[in-house]
Image: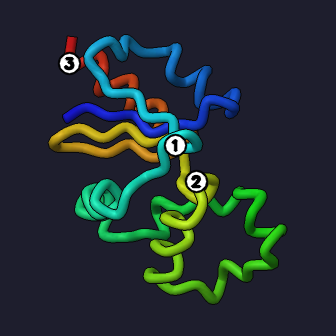
């Protein structure tokens, strides 16, 4: 399995996707085809944390007046399943690894991954 979960209206996502050869990857636009509970469970198996998959930059946090400091794991899970913007993105998933988000460290890890898999 090689999947990328991303948002096509997110400039950062599209910039990151252009950095890599994704011809053998399944590209999944999460607004038009939301993440499923099974897919989220697959991601959770790597992280053991829904919070690690949760975007604390989602515009829905302010719109819904959510206090993220009091959320529990089940809350993070339910929010991610409820609205696409709660998933930290992009998410690259393979059979053995997961790369979550757009922070510099994650992008460096992705670069190493792609260099090693040529």
Q: Quadrant of the N terminus?
A: top left
Q: Position of residue 54 (x, y in %)?
A: 54, 62
Q: Earlier in the sequence, mark 1 or mark 3?
A: 1
In the displayed image of the protein, which residue is found farthest to the front?
A: 32
Q: Are marks 2 and 1 in contact (CB under 8 Å)?
A: yes
Q: Earlier in the sequence, mark 2 or mark 3?
A: 2
Q: Which residue is mark 3?
A: 117
Dividing the picture into quarters, in which one does residue 117 lie? top left
Q: Position of residue 67 (x, y in %)?
A: 73, 82
Q: Give the side of residue 76 with respect to residue 10, left or right.
A: left
Dividing the picture into quarters, in which one does residue 13 lie? top right
Q: CA distance from mark 2 to mark 1?
A: 6 Å
Q: CA distance from mark 1 to mark 3?
A: 26 Å
Q: Quadrant of the C terminus?
A: top left
Residue shown at 46%/63% (left/top)?
52
User: In the rendered image, is residue 105 in sight?
Assistant: no
Q: Is residue 97 above or below residue 8?
A: below
Crowding near pointer 1: few (<14 within 10 Å), some, many (20+)? many
Residue shown at 29%/16% (left/top)?
115
Query: Which structural element holds mark 1?
Result: loop
């Amino acid at each position: 399995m090689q999947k990328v979960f991303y948002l096509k209206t997110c400039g950062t996502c599209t910039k990151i996707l252009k950095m890599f050869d994704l011809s053998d990857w399944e590209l999944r636009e999460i607004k038009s085809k939301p993440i499923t509970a099974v897919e989220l469970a697959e991601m959770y198996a790597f992280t053991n944390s829904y919070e690690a998959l949760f975007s604390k930059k989602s515009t829905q946090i302010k719109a819904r007046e959510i206090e993220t400091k009091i959320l529990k794991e089940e809350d993070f899970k339910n929010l991610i399943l409820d609205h696409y913007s709660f998933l930290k993105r992009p998410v690259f998933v393979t059979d053995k690894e997961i790369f979550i988000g757009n922070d510099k460290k994650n992008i460096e890890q992705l670069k190493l991954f792609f260099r090693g898999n040529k």
